[in-house]
Amino acid sequence: MNRPSLRHTLGRSIARKLLVLAMLCVVIAGWAGWQYSRRQAVDSETLGDYRADGRAITLLLVEPDVSLNLDAGLRRDSTARLARALDRRLADLGYRTQALSARSDEERFGLTAQTSARTAAIQHQARTAQTIREVGAPVLRVSLDGMKRDGREIAEQAYRIELLDPQTLQPAWRATLTWREGRYQSLALLWHLRHNRLPPPLWDSLADLAMARMREDGVIRAEALIQ
């Protein structure tokens, strides 16, 4: 008489454990999905009435210097790659682009302690500003806005994109692009491997995000279609 009761109790115990395990899997999957959805974000603000209404844009790259201590000078940011990705997308939309560097080699490599290096940096900035005014095209400035670390690993990267009036060099529009690393990256890899392809690198994902927001905010031409 006790055997059926024991079997029934054991069955209920196994069922409860399986239910708890299923609920735990649902919680983990939900947390992972939430983390994945936060891997990239964009915040923008309009600061003036100036817009890129023409067919030309000057892309101004502000590369960080070694004073930011990006792994002892080894470049771990993706500022230049993000700028190149934006350049390609703008060209695909019919814009003529001209790339300029906002910082001199002396600034980028932390050599401005010497008077001659400081003078070279100032001259580089003056030539860049003069070229921007002569071209007269809207300026899209791309720069690193900050990094957060989790131990020795980079956990978060933020990039700033600004639309500048070429005459005043004052921003009329600004966006901050954020990319967060984490365990969800493995989920992205598995999801894309289902289609036999790798997930896009962060600079391509952020460039797509920036283009969509610029179109939404009216920064680029309304008829410009994203390929």
Image: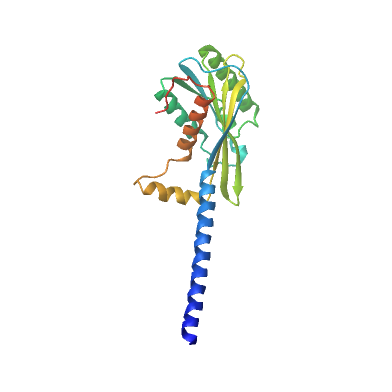
Above or below, 210 against 28 in this view is: above
Q: Please identify the residue farthest to the left as the structure is shown.
A: 196
**Residue 195: x percent and y percent?**
35, 46
Give the color scheme: rainbow, by chain, secondary structure or one colour.
Answer: rainbow
Q: Quadrant of residue 114?
A: top right
Residue placed furthest toward the bottom = 1
Give the mark count.
Answer: 0
The residue under the point 62% across, 25% down is 116
Quarter assignment of residue 65: top right
> Residue farthest to the front?
1
Q: Nearer the viewer, residue 31 or 74?
A: 31
Looking at the image, residue 201 lies above or below residue 136:
below
Tell me, yes or no, if residue 71 can be seen here. Answer: no
Q: Position of residue 81 (x, y in %)?
A: 47, 34
Name the residue rendered at 51%, 69% in the picture.
Answer: 17
> Which is nearer the eye, 102 or 218?
218
Which image quadrant: the C terminus? top left
User: Is residue 31 positioned above or below 79 on the image?
Assistant: below
Residue 98 position in % (x across, y down): 47, 21
Residue in the foreground of this view, choosing between 3 and 183 = 3
In this orientation, does residue 90 appear? yes
Residue 53 in the image: above or below residue 16 = above
Q: Name the spot of residue 86 as percent of width and height, x first.
A: 47, 29
Which image quadrant for residue 176? Answer: top right
